[in-house]
Image: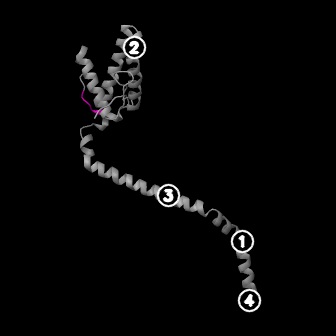
Amino acid sequence: MGVGRGLLLMLAILAVCCLPALFALVFCADEILDRVACGWAEWREQRRERRTIARLDRAIEAESLTRDIDLTEFDRADRRPLEQLATDLRRLGGHRLAASDRSVVWHGAVIDAYDERLRAACGALGIPEHLTELDGVDREIERVRVEGLLHAAGLTLPAARPGHHQRHR
């Protein structure tokens, strides 16, 4: 009977040692299940997103859109980041639209700076533009066309009239 008592004593000690872990498991079971369920849901959502993106890439042939863009242009040290160009365009576009109380010289300088940033953004995205070749109303029309192409490429700019949002299909 000495062996049975020793075994019983070992089991009792083991139960007492495991008791805190058992309490933690019981009290935190909902948290553990919640984490497992959330992890599973995130994995499924990421998998669904990857599949959707792959289907969209196949549908629009994404490589054909970027085939004509020279990617070495993006690695030049003197090239301004596209994010900086977008920020400059938004700032200058706002100044251009709110220039009614400024001098003609100031307004002309803002438009020239705005057009220079438009040309740089078009160059970075491989969009053809003719702003330097035109003047007057033709230049205004070209500016609107270029803004539309940049917007279609994902670069949101201020609208031509205050209070209106830029919409392109």
Rate crowding at label 4 as few (under 14), some (14 to 19) or many (20 or more) other CA atoms within 10 Å: few
Q: Quadrant of residue 65?
A: top left
Tell me the quarter of the image containing the N terminus: bottom right
In front of the other: 158 or 115: 158
Q: Is mark 3 in CB contact (under 8 Å) with mark 2? A: no
What is the spatial separation of the Cα atoms under label 1 and label 3, in whole angstroms?
Answer: 31 Å
Tell me where the magenta segment starts and ends, as one range: 124-128
Q: How many marks?
A: 4
What is the spatial separation of the Cα atoms under label 1 and label 4, in whole angstroms?
Answer: 21 Å
What is the spatial separation of the Cα atoms under label 1 and label 2, in whole angstroms?
Answer: 78 Å
- Residue 162 shown in magenta: no
Residue that numbered label 3 is attached to: 39
Tell me the quarter of the image containing the C terminus: top left
Q: Which badge, 1 or 4, is on the more N-terminal residue? A: 4
Q: Which badge, 4 or 2, is on the more N-terminal residue? A: 4
Q: Which badge, 1 or 2, is on the more N-terminal residue? A: 1
What is the spatial separation of the Cα atoms under label 3 and label 2, in whole angstroms?
Answer: 53 Å
Residue that numbered label 1 is attached to: 17
What is the spatial separation of the Cα atoms under label 4 and label 2, in whole angstroms?
Answer: 98 Å
